[in-house]
């Protein structure tokens, strides 16, 4: 069977993984990150592997699906997969596809392309049938389908993020991971990860990141399994070299001196903490399970271990007051981070944040409130103004501040505006399906 997997702009690990499984089953599989209508028209099956709600709204994707369906009728089946599959009803209402491969697709996708319906959501007349899979994959899959140009890809500086484990113990209200992958941590064998890293290296990948939500939860059973985590880092580092390995994503409550020392010894020596806010009240609202003090302690510990620290922050959470926001600015001054990322709170369908956004009047959402403060002339919403302001503020309080040039100013302004527009578009879509999402 000729199968094409389309993963917009980036070869995601999930798309490569499913590609590898289908190839192992002797299908003729192509993986592309740009729309290729000629290839699509020759395919028996096209899987759109989508990882952002914005993809559902993307006009180019919509038009392409309509074009293929019109030209090929039922000779080409089109399925949607990826994290957007957590909300199949929205997809089946918005896109004219044959079905949505719901959740983790390793077991179900090879069966679905042959006509099976387990793990598939689809239309039957006016009804939408959601046929959830009964099994969860073990993560002992064949080597992914690695594209020839993988060495040219950059995702936060790495050619690829290799998955080492799945699931998260956290409850963060804005995050889809625990619901999508579950709260039990499933981990791959060190040997399997090592073989895969070698395969990526042979295919031209140089810089590898390993991930699974929180790096140090690798091999977690009832507690953190430090030795397995160290074994993993040591083995992967031997293959790619410490300057080409990163294990960026860490929770502040799952690091200690030993873990950070291993990060320093075996990787490029950076951690990336999800700090989110400087306000303890907002951290409680987000169910982050951390607080200002724990965050500052973990940053200090990393610095003491000579590990660089980046922090990501979320602004304009629905309950964030002006005072909460000022506490975040204050935190950034105290933390003196090496790098900072700022996002406006994005409600992903099925998360608690999504329910919260839908249960309040749209006009009260900071993305719809006009900013009346210092940036009034720029015509921003309050959420965009906070995002822009925090990006500039963080630049001044990083360990290595950069002068705020007109270029940097415009870069941050455009970033804040783009985030604001994108998330407003998502919110409009969510309100269209409010009853469905809140049921
Ligand atoms: S944000 Fe991180 S810690 Fe929180 S639930 Fe998601 S993956 Fe887990």
Image (cartoon, helix red, strand yellow):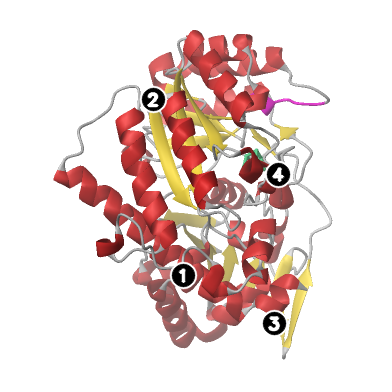
Which residue is depicted at the point 38% across and 25% down? 338
Pointer 3 or 2: first along the chain:
3
**Residue under label 4:** 287
Which residue is depicted at the point 35% across and 29% down? 397
Query: Relative to 16, does residue 363 appear above or below in the rendering?
Result: below
Is any atom of residue 82 visible in this view?
Answer: no
Pointer 2 or 1: first along the chain:
2
**Residue under label 2:** 338
Q: Nearer the viewer, mark 3 or mark 1?
A: 1
Distance from the alpha carbon under mark 4 to that under mark 2: 26 Å
- Dot 2 falls on a residue whose secondary structure is loop
Say whether marks 4 and 2 touch (CB < 8 Å).
no
- Position of the N terminus, as image quadrant, is bottom right
**Residue under label 1:** 368
Q: Position of residue 44 (x, y in %)?
A: 53, 70
Q: Nearer the viewer, mark 2 or mark 1?
A: 1
**Residue under label 3:** 123
Q: Position of residue 96 (x, y in %)?
A: 55, 81
- Asked if residue 219 lies in the magenta stretch, the reply is yes
Query: Relative to 135, does residue 328 appear above or below in the rendering?
Result: above
Q: How many marks?
A: 4
Distance from the alpha carbon under mark 3 to that under mark 1: 35 Å
């Amino acid at each position: 069977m000729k199968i094409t997997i389309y993963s917009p702009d980036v070869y995601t690990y999930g798309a490569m993984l499913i590609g590898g499984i289908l190839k192992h089953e002797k299908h003729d599989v192509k993986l592309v990150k740009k729309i290729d209508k000629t290839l699509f028209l020759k395919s028996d099956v096209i899987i759109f592997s989508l990882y952002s709600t914005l993809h559902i709204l993307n006009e180019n994707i919509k038009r392409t699906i309509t074009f293929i369906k019109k030209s090929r009728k039922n000779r080409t089946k089109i399925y949607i997969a990826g994290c957007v599959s957590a909300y199949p009803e929205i997809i089946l209402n918005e896109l004219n596809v044959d079905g949505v491969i719901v959740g983790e697709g390793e077991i179900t996708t090879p069966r679905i392309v042959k006509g099976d319906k387990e793990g598939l959501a689809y239309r039957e007349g006016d009804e939408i049938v959601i046929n959830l899979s009964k099994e969860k994959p073990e993560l002992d899959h064949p080597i992914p389908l690695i594209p020839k140009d993988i060495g040219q890809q950059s995702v936060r500086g790495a050619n690829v993020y290799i998955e080492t484990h799945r699931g998260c113990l956290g409850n963060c209200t804005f995050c889809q991971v625990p619901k999508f992958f579950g709260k039990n941590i499933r981990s791959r064998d060190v040997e399997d990860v090592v073989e895969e890293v070698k395969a990526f290296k042979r295919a031209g990948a140089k810089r590898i990141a390993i991930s699974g939500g929180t790096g140090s939860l690798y091999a977690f059973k009832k507690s953190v399994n430090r030795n397995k985590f160290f074994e993993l880092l040591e083995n992967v580092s031997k293959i790619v070299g410490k300057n080409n390995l990163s294990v960026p994503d860490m929770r502040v409550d799952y690091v200690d001196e030993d873990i950070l020392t291993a990060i320093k010894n075996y990787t490029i020596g950076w951690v990336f903490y999800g700090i989110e806010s400087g306000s303890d009240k907002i951290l409680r609202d987000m169910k982050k399970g951390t607080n200002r003090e724990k965050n500052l302690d973990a940053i200090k510990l990393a610095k003491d271990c000579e590990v660089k620290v980046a922090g990501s922050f979320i602004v304009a959470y629905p309950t964030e007051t002006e005072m909460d926001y000022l506490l975040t600015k204050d935190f950034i001054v105290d933390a003196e981070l090496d790098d900072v990322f700022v996002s406006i709170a994005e409600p992903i369908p099925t998360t608690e944040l999504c329910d919260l956004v839908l249960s309040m009047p749209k006009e009260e959402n900071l993305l719809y409130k006009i900013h009346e403060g210092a940036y009034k002339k720029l015509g921003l919403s309050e959420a965009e103004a906070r995002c822009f302001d925090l990006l500039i503020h963080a630049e001044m309080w990083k360990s290595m501040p950069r002068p705020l040039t007109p270029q940097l100013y415009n870069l941050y302004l455009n970033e804040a505006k783009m985030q604001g527009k994108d998330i407003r578009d998502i919110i409009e879509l969510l309100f269209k399906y409010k009853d469905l999402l809140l049921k």
